[in-house]
Image: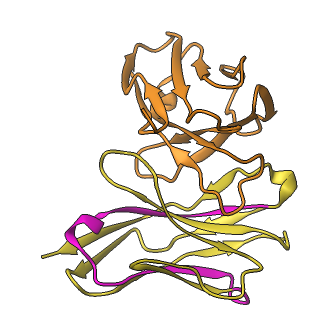
Amino acid sequence: GAGVSQSPRYKVAKRGQDVALRCDPISGHVSLFWYQQALGQGPEFLTYFQNEAQLDKSGLPSDRFFAERPEGSVSTLKIQRTQQEDSAVYLCASTYTRLPRSGELFFGEGSRLTVL
Amino acid sequence: AQKITQTQPGMFVQEKEAVTLDCTYDTSDPSYGLFWYKQPSSGEMIFLIYQGSYDQQNATEGRYSLNFQKARKSANLVISASQLGDSAMYFCAMRGSYHQGGKLIFGQGTELSVKP
């Protein structure tokens, strides 16, 4: 497809399980972002890639969160030993420029994680 | 630190009327960008409009216009001739300067309901 694709769309995990969320950005997009959106809140920045380099991971809430983009295209967000507070929608976004000026971010529909 | 504030949790507007969604921001960067996104119930963030801090004129995109008042640090979104399909969450966001790497900081959002 032409847009940012995320999978799975919905994930239910038991507390303590590991989860992996996948993001397929728009082909050729250099920059890729992960955001966490809790219910009723605005998206919160997690991490940012420029090609395969993770340039900013300041938003990752704990060392249980890990993101990678080994070949500069598909990215995976991994959450180890999930906790209930990890329940949220995880949004992926990409853009074609290294520094989006007027170029907007293109968002996927998100992966909704529910931790029981 | 950068901050975006949206003080209207919910707004109602009659179909075909205009509505203004408020957004104030705080930053010490001289160069920044301001964005508005729409998030329907499907979850995808849809880019609406962009305003650069050095842009002389207020941005307009179809029925959307951005009332940018730099001295007041406000960037309100005006939607003219509201349509039922405009019912959604609306987020104001800010992008900082180069060293910020292009990440967006989002406000808490405003839920707009358009009444027939």
Find the residue positioned furthest to the top.
Answer: A17
Find the residue positioned furthest to the left.
Answer: B116
In the rendered view of the protein, which quadrant contains the C terminus of chain B?
Answer: bottom left
Residue positioned 50% across, 31% down in the render: A85
Q: Is residue A57 above or below residue B76?
A: above
Q: Is residue A75 above or below residue A91?
A: above
Q: Is residue B73 left or right of residue A10?
A: right
Residue positioned 26% across, 69% down in the render: B113
Please check the rendered image and state whether residue A30 is part of the magenta-colored stretch, yes or no. Answer: no
> Residue A4, percent across and down?
49, 36
> Residue A34, percent across and down?
61, 36
In the rendered view of the protein, which quadrant contains the N terminus of chain B?
Answer: bottom right
Residue positioned 73% across, 90% down in the render: B71
Q: Nearer the viewer, residue B41 or A98?
A: A98
> Residue B94, percent across and down?
66, 63
Chain letter for the orange part:
A
Count of numbered badges drawn on the protein: 0
Extent of the magenta region = B70-96
Residue positioned 68% across, 64% down in the render: B3
Q: Colour of chain B?
A: yellow
Q: Nearer the viewer, residue A14 or B6?
A: B6
Please check the rendered image and state whether residue B95 is part of the magenta-colored stretch, yes or no. Answer: yes
> Residue B2, percent across and down?
74, 63
Task: Determine the image quadrant of residue A48.
Answer: top right
Task: Determine the image quadrant of residue B46.
Answer: bottom left
